[in-house]
Amino acid sequence: MNQTLDLIKFITASPSSFHAARVVADRLIAAGFSPQDETSPWDATPGGHVMVRGGAVMAWWVPEDATPDAGFRIIGSHTDSPGFTLKPAPELVNSGWAQAGVEVYGGPILASWLDRELTFAGRVVLGDGSVRLVSTGPIARIPHLAVHLDRSKELTLDRQLHMQPIIGVAGDGAPSVLDVVASRAGVDKHDIDGFELITSDTQPGQIFGADGELIAAGRMDNLTSVHASLLALLRAIGSGDTGPDILVLAAFDHEEVGSATTTGAAGPILEDVLTRTAHALGADGDGLRRMYARSSCVSADAAHSVHPNHAARHDPDHHPLINGGPVLKINANQRYASNAETVARWRRACRAAGVPSQTFVGNNSVPCGSTIGPITATRLGIATVDVGVPLLSMHSARELAGVSDQVWFVDALEAYLINR
């Protein structure tokens, strides 16, 4: 139960990717990791090191007597979740209401965002170049249209017309959304030169169910994996049994919009960390590639649990169930990076941890999503497996997971890091 409460606390503290990256870094630094400035010489001395770039965080643990004969054991995840980002000119007034102009980020389930108290969270950049993280608290809401005014049987939401949140009644002296952002950041609105702010549901996570076995919260895709990889890394290090490989936590940003950014999995950030670490250990270009050949990656991202009201959308012979164990994700068209060798490695880790394992394969008639796994495998040539805890309501403003799955996922990830 303490681990579940810690997950809920972690999610609450991470209303944006920028907050999530900072929370991970702060917890690692508190555990003895050293912060790495990208403009400084690279640190690959024995011990832990952590680097934040925007909404991404990278951490690496270098064992004693590490050499270029080692490999990397990587757990990849992502810090971002679907939502609505604040537009550059967000201050709107319509029919007497003050609104915030937003742009859809990723693939949110639109209806799930109606009638929720929302914060805008992220970062602001000031005229002097300094950056501040900010979360406004509950200031916005996207109101549903009353049933009396729409008797149609099907809910149809236009992403531009129907999803602009209200923040209050317009009038002289009424604060705009940027007024509130500036106030919460402790700056003058006119000092803000840039911002990246996304909506987040302010309702705290909740443990529920007949036996208290379920978790409801926002952003569990994919903060469940970020949190699990953080705990697994710290536990593996604490075990004293990490072996010769460099352990890497890679929590990327922008997975929900394709990963093609400087902080996404399709960008250079992980390669930068691995290359600079290898070179600091004395590896040349060929030595780096040999290290890659000895490496592996777990792409940790949420999986689909079978939906009891829509079971026909799932493959009839693969029905992952919440609290049935972490899920292997396999796709013949390489939407997931799992292959026979990496699947076998993951199953060995689950057996070593005493953790049950399930498998997800998509229904042939239902398009399959993807993850950072194929991107990482393709960019670096590192053998990768795709896994995650099963969820219901993925991409909803409030998703559903299982208490036992999250505990087992940490156990399995720890076993992957230390199992030789």
Image (spheres, rainbow, N blue to C red):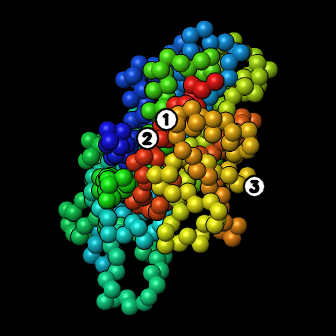
Few, some or many residues within 10 Å of mark 2 (<14, 14–19, 20+):
some
**Which residue matches tag 3?**
332
Choose top left, top right, bottom left or bottom right for residue 125.
Answer: top left
Where, quadrant-wise, is the N terminus in this rendering? top left
The three-letter amino acid code for the residue at tag 3 is: Ala
- What mark, if any, has residue 411 been given in the picture? 1
Element assignment for label 1 = helix
Few, some or many residues within 10 Å of mark 1 (<14, 14–19, 20+):
many
Where, quadrant-wise, is the C terminus in this rendering? top right
In contact (CB < 8 Å): disc 3 and disc 1:
no
The three-letter amino acid code for the residue at tag 2 is: Val
Element assignment for label 2 = helix
At 27% from the left edge and 76% from the top edge, which residue is drawn? 96
- Calculate the distance from the C-alpha at mark 1 to the C-alpha at mark 2: 7 Å
- What mark, if any, has residue 407 been given in the picture? 2
Q: Judge left or right: residue 346 versus residue 227.
A: right
Q: Judge left or right: residue 268 versus residue 169.
A: right
Image coordinates for residue 101, horizontal then vertical, percent = 41, 64
At 60% from the left edge and 26% from the top edge, which residue is drawn? 419
Image coordinates for residue 280, horizontal then vertical, percent = 64, 14
- Calculate the distance from the C-alpha at mark 3 to the C-alpha at mark 1: 28 Å
- Calculate the distance from the C-alpha at mark 3 to the C-alpha at mark 2: 29 Å
At 45% from the left edge and 20% from the top edge, which residue is drawn? 238
Element assignment for label 3 = loop
Q: Give the mark, 3 or 1, whose residue is nearer the N terminus.
A: 3
Q: Nearer the viewer, mark 3 or mark 2?
A: 2
Q: Nearer the viewer, residue 93 or 18?
A: 18
Image coordinates for residue 344, horizontal then vertical, percent = 69, 39
In contact (CB < 8 Å): disc 1 and disc 2:
yes
The answer to whether residue 252 shows anywhere in this view is no
